[in-house]
Image (spheres, rainbow, N blue to C red):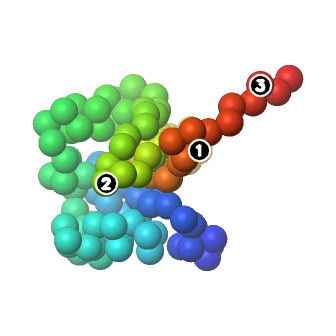
Amino acid sequence: MEWIEKLDGNVIVSDADGKIIYMNERALAAYEKDGGRDLIGRDLLECHSEASRKKIMEIMTSGKKNVYTIEKRGKKKIIYQSPWFADGIFRGITELSLEIPFEMPHFIRE
């Protein structure tokens, strides 16, 4: 799945226990100062603040996604955190971080 590796955004995937099992090239580069490839195998909870740990635990227990935007270093991003399932069983969390324009068209389609 080369497209995920080359995606112009971060992709991080954990297993059901919160262990990081995948980071695409962009995520590895973005988190190089924090360990990059060495983050694979680490617990998501260890890598986040208390408030973020609570949100991660909520996603894991409720199965509901968490979506928001941030502004950091002059860039606006959408953060999309969602549980992933296989055969109807919770298997972990995916996080997509994609840069978006500050002003963006919005369309209503029916």
| Quadrant assignment, res 109 | top right
Q: Residues within 10 Å of mark 1 (few under 14, many from 20)?
A: few
Q: Label 2 amino acid?
A: Arg
Disc 3 to disc 1: CB gap under 8 Å? no
Residue farthest toward the right in the current orientation of the protein = 110
The kind of secondary structure element at disc 1 is loop
Residue 8: x %, y % from top left: 54, 65
> Sequence-wise, which precedes: disc 2 or disc 3?
2
- Distance, label 3 to label 1, CA atoms, is 33 Å
User: In the rendered image, which residue does mark 1 sit on?
Assistant: 87
Disc 2 to disc 1: CB gap under 8 Å? no
The kind of secondary structure element at disc 2 is loop
User: In the rendered image, which residue does mark 3 sit on?
Assistant: 108
Residue plotted at (61% across, 76% down) = 2
- Distance, label 2 to label 1, CA atoms, is 40 Å
Q: Is residue 1 placed above or below 80 in the rendered structure?
A: below
Disc 2 to disc 3: CB gap under 8 Å? no
- Label of residue 99 in the image: none
Q: Residues within 10 Å of mark 2 (few under 14, many from 20)?
A: few
Front position in the image: 105 or 50:
105
> Sequence-wise, which precedes: disc 3 or disc 1?
1
Q: Is residue 91 placed above or below 23 in the rendered structure?
A: above
User: In the rendered image, which residue does mark 2 sit on?
Assistant: 73
Q: Label 1 amino acid?
A: Asp
Q: Label 3 amino acid?
A: Ile
Q: Is residue 39 left or right of residue 86?
A: left
